Amino acid sequence: MLKGISPLISPELLATLARMGHGDEIVLADAHFPGESFNARVLRADGLRIPALLDAILPLFVIDTYVPDPLVMMAAVPGDSLDPSVEASYLAPIRKHAPDAPAITRIDRFAFYERTRKAYAVLMTGETAKYGNILLKKGVTPIV
């Protein structure tokens, strides 16, 4: 373990976040998402929920401020509905660590799959919320 880094961040996840460049994307996928079907770089965070992972990742990760949609979730398919509490639970850690981040953009399921194919990595989680996937685009990390 390292001081100041959440124990929810595995060594593999920490290395992945560090290797990502600005503009690279990572998908935090729910437990039902077919991550291995869309991306060769899949990490596991089984049993962990996405709000807790966002709270652990976002102190280390700058959200891209140069694009209109650095936070993306899947839109409901026609005839289905979204549970607004899912997005609200994600926005709490996002607003805590990135208060100036734009709103979450919703895109069609197949467009989300295509973004997943191009993403740097997919983090499979234990999230069970329906439409619980979220994509984060990494920004430029400021020099401290």
Image (cartoon, rainbow, N blue to C red):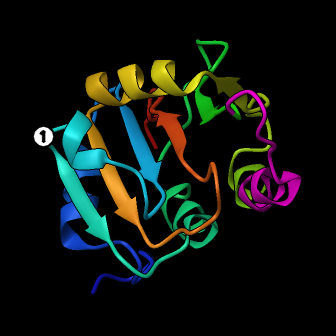
The reply, left or right, for residue 120 in relation to residue 100 is left
In this view, 82 is above or below 22: below
Observer able to see residue 132 = yes
In this view, 128 is above or below 69: below
> Could you tell me the amino acid type at mark 1?
Ala
Q: Mark 1 points at which residue?
A: 40
Q: Which residue is drawn at 60% across and 21% down?
A: 108
Residue 76 coordinates in the image, percent (x, y): 71, 35
In this view, 127 is above or below 135: below
Residue 127 coordinates in the image, percent (x, y): 53, 68
The reply, left or right, for residue 135 in relation to residue 100 is left
Residue 114, magenta (yes or no): no
Q: Which residue lies furthest to the front in this view?
A: 79
Q: Which residue is drawn at 45% across and 27% down?
A: 140
Callout 1: SS? loop
Residue 25 coordinates in the image, percent (x, y): 39, 31
Q: Which residue is drawn at 43% across and 64% down?
A: 31
Count of picture labels: 1
Residues shaded magenta? 77-92
Residue 3 coordinates in the image, percent (x, y): 38, 83
Residue 87, magenta (yes or no): yes
Which one is in front, 137 or 65?
137
Specify few, some or many for label 1: CA neighbours under 10 Å numbering under 14, 14-19, or 20 or more. few
Q: Which residue is drawn at 35% across and 76% down?
A: 46
